[in-house]
Image (cartoon, rainbow, N blue to C red):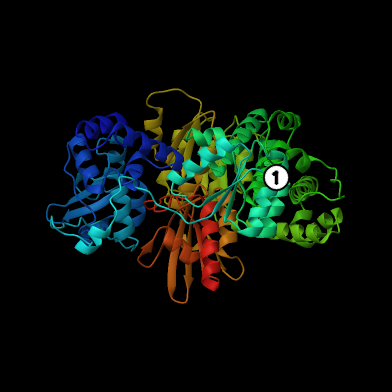
Amino acid sequence: MVNISKLKSHFIAGGQLTEEQLRQAEDYAITKGINIYEALVFLNILDYETLGKGLAIIHGKPYHTLLINPPPDSAKALVPLKFAVRWKIFPIDYDAEKDILTLALDNPEDHIIIEKLRSIFSAHRHLMFVVASRPEINKAIDVYYKGQSYVPVKNLDLPEDFSIVSPEQDSEKELSLEDKTCSQKKILLLEPDRARSSALQTLLDREGYSNVELAYSTEEAIRICEENLPELLLVNGRTFDSQTSRFKDITHKYGLSPVSFYQFAPILLGQEYSYRQMSQALINLVMFLMKKSIKEDEKQLQEILTRARYCKLLALRLNLSPSQADGLILAAWLSSNKFGKRLTRLITTPYHLNKILSTDADEGGTKSIEANILKLVTKYQFIKNREPEVTQNINQVRKLLDQQSSLPENKAILEAFLRVIKDEEFLKKVDHPSRHILVVDPYVSQESTMVLRLMNDGYKVKLLPDAKSAVKVIINSEVDLVISEISLPETDGIGFCRALRKNASTAHIPFIFLTAEESERLAAECLEAGADDFLKKPIDPDLLSLKIQRLMANRSPNESKEGINGSLREMNITDMIQNLSAGEKNVRIMLDSHDKKGQIYIRNGEIVHAYIGSSEGENAFYRLMSWEEGNFRIVTCSDFPQHSIRGSTMSLLMEGARQADEEKK
């Protein structure tokens, strides 16, 4: 990737990019986990051609557009898909007479990549390079290797006197300096302060909501609902916070949309944030504080992560409201230790966390559904820790968990939870079906954070102290990936890696170096020896896990065995995506039904792209969500197409369910 400072100076100096646009792209890139080029293209700040020409000037290499014409078959034949995907290159041309292969890449100044490419294509005497941006290369691979459709954006040149409004219509149109879209949605505003209610009414009117009725008390709001039912009820959250249950009764009685509680000061100042933004910020804060409090205890951290994930999945399966789901997730995080209980007392939330965390029933002798879910999940984890073999039998699990209550609603929760467990076990096979990792390091123990994380991710881990014993294991058993320290007894790690690469039967095994040694040339020596990656200790477990997933996907010896297959009758798309999202998976879902085919891409648990036929983005995703019959295949994914979807997974699923219901009606 080119130095970001060069990118800034070139495009800003040329007037093609502003500081504000660059900040937007950087924020979006960090949020979505993509590079800055992908963000610039996705946000329509720069197009492929402008970006490519700019890179050409920065690097002093010619730019070649990739999407107008397909590459020659002779060039494409020399660059297999797996090479193009892994090294982010695209074939441009091959001159057989002169034996020159021309490749496009995004940074011809990356000497490590250049040397690697020269070693890969050593059969050719000459390699030539041109420049294209990373997103354009990815798109070209999708189109010319994977068969995806591509429709270039066309600029429409119109005559100066062209108009889609007739003169008669134009003369009848009212001249207005305000760009205001009016909504006929009726809103009931419950605000006891008359001056404030008048100000808010004016603010809503300027935003295009002209049909606003005022109420100054709960009784008046009920009367208005009975006479002329509104579509939405806006309530001053500070004044009426203690009456939330009463408003909940009103919405159920009259079938209103969910009540929106607002704080008047931020609204008047134009600083109001959405509920989703505020709730997610609170959950992220609690997660950060809790992780910090238990960072030394990897086992407890994994347990609380699993608890929160199960609670989230159950909330989604049982169609709990967003506020119920958020309260449950917060309670799951705060239930882990004494610090969590102390934090519960310090923070003020609208979720009644004490009731969810309490073991006592309320005045009516029952517990809330959130409290019952948390109790069920916690009990299951206790059983699994004490008797792990018991949890292999789903009927035995049902019997043990069913003892906590005989109420019908709790039995429904239990059955939903058992389904979540079965689905999760099924989807675990996506990432690593029986993957074996060999760790060669005399300084790492079975109880280390790294080994525990790999085992929690579902890998089978074998730990050895030296290269000689490791070679024997690799020859006599199945090993899918090697993680090695450089400093080993007798033979060092670099010699060990070279030996594996020279042997045809072991050359394909992904190899990662981990070391605490300090040397400027060390990383280069490791990569020259044939290693796939080099990481310094102490290791970030999340980073290591992500790199392993990518290496496994890229080096699969038999792709047809990868992933899992199933029927949509056994697992619907909504449940599938909920599980994959909660597990923050990087996958590609391939769907087929009655000769129709489509795909959904999920990156770090977020839906980033979908297509069916020539349709892409959210519309394609909603069409796929409506499928009730067909088959699916899920495989791990490390290289994603250009993002065409920006919404959160939760909002996409909700909108997809709404559209599916409307279609049925």
Q: Quadrant of the C terminus?
A: bottom right
Q: Position of residue 444 (x, y in %)?
A: 61, 32
Dot 1 corresponds to which residue?
Answer: 244
Q: Position of residue 143 (x, y in %)?
A: 31, 59
Identify which residue, 466 or 408, lies in the foreground.
Answer: 408
Q: Quadrant of the N terminus?
A: top left
Q: Residue at x 37, y 32 (%)?
A: 524
Identify which residue, 375 or 23, lies in the foreground.
Answer: 23
Residue 555 in sight in this render: no
Q: Residue at x 29, y 54 (%)?
A: 174
Is 266 positioned to the left or the right of 182 in the image?
Answer: right
Identify which residue, 201 or 429, lies in the foreground.
Answer: 201
Count of labels shown? 1
Q: Residue at x 47, y 63 (%)?
A: 622
Is 7 positioned to the left or the right of 465 in the image?
Answer: left
Q: Which element carries disc 1, helix, strand or loop?
A: helix
Residue 349 in sight in this render: yes
**Mark 1, residues whose alpha carbon is within 10 Å: few (<14), some, or many (≥20)?**
some
Identify which residue, 104 or 599, lies in the foreground.
Answer: 599
The correct choice, above or below, for 496 with respect to 586 in the image is above
Q: Quadrant of residue 342?
A: top right
Q: Position of residue 450 (x, y in %)?
A: 59, 36
Given the current orientation, which residue lies at the most extreme bottom position? 594
Amino acid under label 1?
Thr
The correct choice, above or below, for 457 with respect to 521 in the image is below
The correct choice, above or below, for 415 with respect to 29 in the image is below
Q: Position of residue 290 (x, y in %)?
A: 66, 32
